[in-house]
Amino acid sequence: MCMTCGCSDTETITLTDPATGKAITLSKAEHDRAHALGIAHDHGHTHDRDAFRGHGHDHPDDHAHDHVHEHAHGPVPAGAAIGGQAKGHTRTMALEEEVLAKNRLLAERNRGWLAGRGVVALNLMSSPGAGKTTLLERTIRDLKEELQIHVIEGDQATVNDAARIRATGCKVIQINTGTGCHLDAEMLARGLRELDPPFGSVVMIENVGNLVCPALFDLGEQAKVVILSVTEGEDKPIKYPHMFKASELMVINKIDLLPYLQFDIERCIAFAREVNPAIRVLRVSAQTGEGMDAWYGWLRSQRHERPHAGVA
């Protein structure tokens, strides 16, 4: 479960290689793995009223409901109640910290794996419909003679975007998260193993369309990039500050539509720098190509961090 918005993200994850049709579904095994590693998680269980006396609150009858708790099952020891509530009910904040800590550990492993191959990985995030896939399609086609680009696509369902990326000649793996709202470091690790990017390549991670949760999960990427389209409203950076605070670069897309919209681009940039004074800003139209040279220049600059990356 995502501890930010409460969505489920481990029961129906599917990895698909559109080139071969190979699909891997991750379900109960992931849950079993969490048990084996002692990772805190949540699921429902039943209460026997007599067995749980001293639980911190009264249960009217034997019943079942959801609890968030460490893995060990059994009656809560006498005296475990804190402030009138059982420990299990006060574990939510600690559990969120543990989930994020576990994710950070896996992200560090991803970072090491990527560094060992000289691969630059960039995490592209946006709300749905901002134009991430169109931006990627144009980028891959324009730079195919210069950069080896591979893609991991994140969506709740369908392989539609992966099919579009594959049509460019680029290798791509689709991760479907089911009801999940973001990619996490473990999903990326599995996607990378399937993608198997060559030494010195660039991996573009198109995250699930969502301006909230993806910002909180480190994937092991070199940089986070937020794409905002001019059709969304210039106040998105102050409505969703965590996303813009976490991102190194904001790409304002669809600027070809500005003559037809009431979108104050300077105000949008001011809002973004209000939450992240260091954020860089590019204005592009992936549809017409306007401003794309600046985006390509920024991509090339990322190779300075990993000098072998991008060798075609």
Image: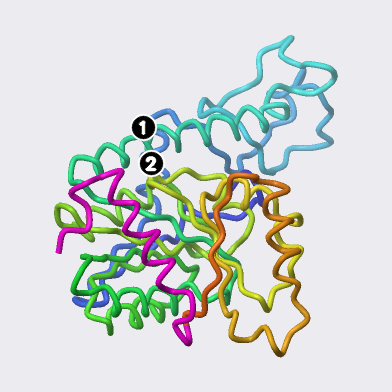
Q: Nearer the viewer, residue 233 or 172?
A: 233
Q: Which residue lies at the image location 22% right of the left edge and 65% below the top edge?
A: 147
Query: From what the image shows, is residue 260 above or below residue 251?
Result: below
The reply to whether dot 2 and dot 1 touch (C-beta < 8 Å) is yes
Q: Which residue lies at the image location 72% right of the left edge and 30% below the top edge?
A: 89
Q: Which SS class for mark 1?
A: helix
Taking the view exactly as shown, the residue that stands out farthest to the top is 79
Label 1 is placed on what type of residue? Ala
Instruction: State the mark number for residue 105.
Output: none
Q: Residues within 10 Å of mark 1 (few under 14, many from 20)?
A: few
Q: Which SS class for mark 2?
A: helix
Q: Is residue 1 visible?
A: no
User: Quarter of the image containing the C terminus?
Assistant: bottom left
Query: From what the image shows, is residue 94 above or below residue 229?
Result: above
Residue range in magenta is 287-312
Label 2 is placed on what type of residue? Asp
Q: Is residue 283 visible?
A: yes
Query: From what the image shows, is residue 255 above or below residue 64?
Result: below
Q: What residue is pinned by disc 2?
A: 32
Q: Which residue lies at the image location 57% right of the left edge and 46% below the top edge?
A: 246
Q: Check if residue 239 falls in the magenta segment.
A: no
**Percent x, y for residue 138?**
37, 79
| Left-right relation of 230 to 55 | left
Q: Nearer the viewer, residue 35 or 104?
A: 104
**Percent x, y for residue 303?**
28, 51
Q: Nearer the viewer, residue 89 or 59?
A: 89
**Percent x, y for residue 54?**
77, 17
Q: What residue is pinned by disc 1?
A: 36
| Left-right relation of 134 to 231 | left
Q: Check if residue 289 falls in the magenta segment.
A: yes
Which image quarter: residue 50? Answer: top right
**Percent x, y for residue 162?**
35, 76
